[in-house]
Amino acid sequence: MTGDIHSLVGAYALDAVDDLERAAVDRHLGECDECRIEAAELRETAARLADGTWSVPPPRLRDTVLAAVATTRQIPVRAARRSRRADRSRWIAAAAAVVAAVGAGTAVFTVQELRVREERAAVEAAHARADEVRAILAAPDMKVRDQALTGGGKVTVAYSRLRDAGVILMAADAVPSGGRVFQLWTVRAGAPVSEGVLPVGQTTAVRVVAGMSAASLVGVSVEPPGGSATPTLMVAGVKTM
């Protein structure tokens, strides 16, 4: 245990002492009003710095805090009372550094966890879409229609009235000129309904479409990036009725 009990007050306030040191500081605080006030102030400051970053001190808190102040020269007991404010500032700075480090680590972990969740959700969505495609293609009343795309390529529509769903498969030979994109459509009750806009540069698409019993036509158009509210340049149209 550190010989100078005064030098342990900062670590004590940050819960960075072992059981023997904590017992010794507890006894000392019962006899020293100044150290007791200092410990209370440091605890309050550390609490404000943490601001909910953790509810239980992490296991390596003691080592991290002590390492942060390891290069700080210890002063004799006689001089300790004259530099109490300086010690307090050093401990506050150390606490802030630890809080910042833990906060950064928490942020990195959170970002990584979100990324894993997003990737898992994407994989699950892909599996679900594949299951839907297989179910439509296996339907007893499944029908297939296709048409060539203006500019090269083909759009194929497989649909089932029993399942009230269909699959649009598009494969173009080239990307649209002028930075434009492909957009998929169905026509329902005479009105076009967007079934998805492809990103710039993408030439293939697989879309599962619900409510195909109400669609009379599946179309592909070329639109500005982001798509359009209604088709402006149709490059294919497949009748489903």
Image (tube, rainbow, N blue to C red):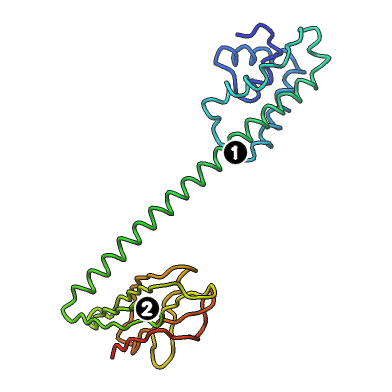
Q: Nearer the viewer, residue 221 or 97?
A: 221
- Residue 186 drawn at (x, y percent): 38, 84
Q: In this image, 77 relative to 232: left or right?
A: right
Q: Position of residue 134 (x, y in %)?
A: 23, 68
Q: Position of residue 207 (x, y in %)?
A: 35, 72
Task: Verify CB contact (< 8 Å) between mark 1 and mark 2.
Answer: no
Q: Is residue 84 above or below residue 131?
A: above
Identified by mark 2, the residue type is Gly
Q: Looking at the image, which is closer to me, 144 or 216? A: 144
Residue under the image location 38 percent in, 89 percent down:
188
Q: Position of residue 27 (x, y in %)?
A: 65, 12
Name, please, the residue furthest toward the right: 82
**Residue sitting at the far left:** 140
Residue type beneath disc 1: Gly
Q: Which of pointers 1 and 2 lies earlier in the amino acid sequence?
A: 1
Spatial CA distance of label 1 from label 2 is 54 Å
Give the mark count.
Answer: 2
Q: Residues within 10 Å of mark 2 (few under 14, many from 20)?
A: few
Residue at the spot x=33%, y=78% of the render? 154
> Does residue 19 lie above or below 153 as drawn?
above
Identify which residue is drawn at 38% across, 74% down. 172
Specify the label residue 152 is tagged with: 2
Question: Does dot 1 land on a helix, a strand or a loop?
Answer: helix
Task: Name which quarter of the figure residue 139 lies in.
Answer: bottom left
Residue occupying image coordinates x 24% and y 74%: 136
Give the structural element (helix, strand or loop) at label 2: loop
In-front residue for pair 63/37:
63
Residue topped by disc 1: 103
Q: Nearer the viewer, mark 1 or mark 2?
A: 2
- Quadrant into which the C terminus falls: bottom left
Q: In screen coordinates, is 135 left or right of 149?
A: left
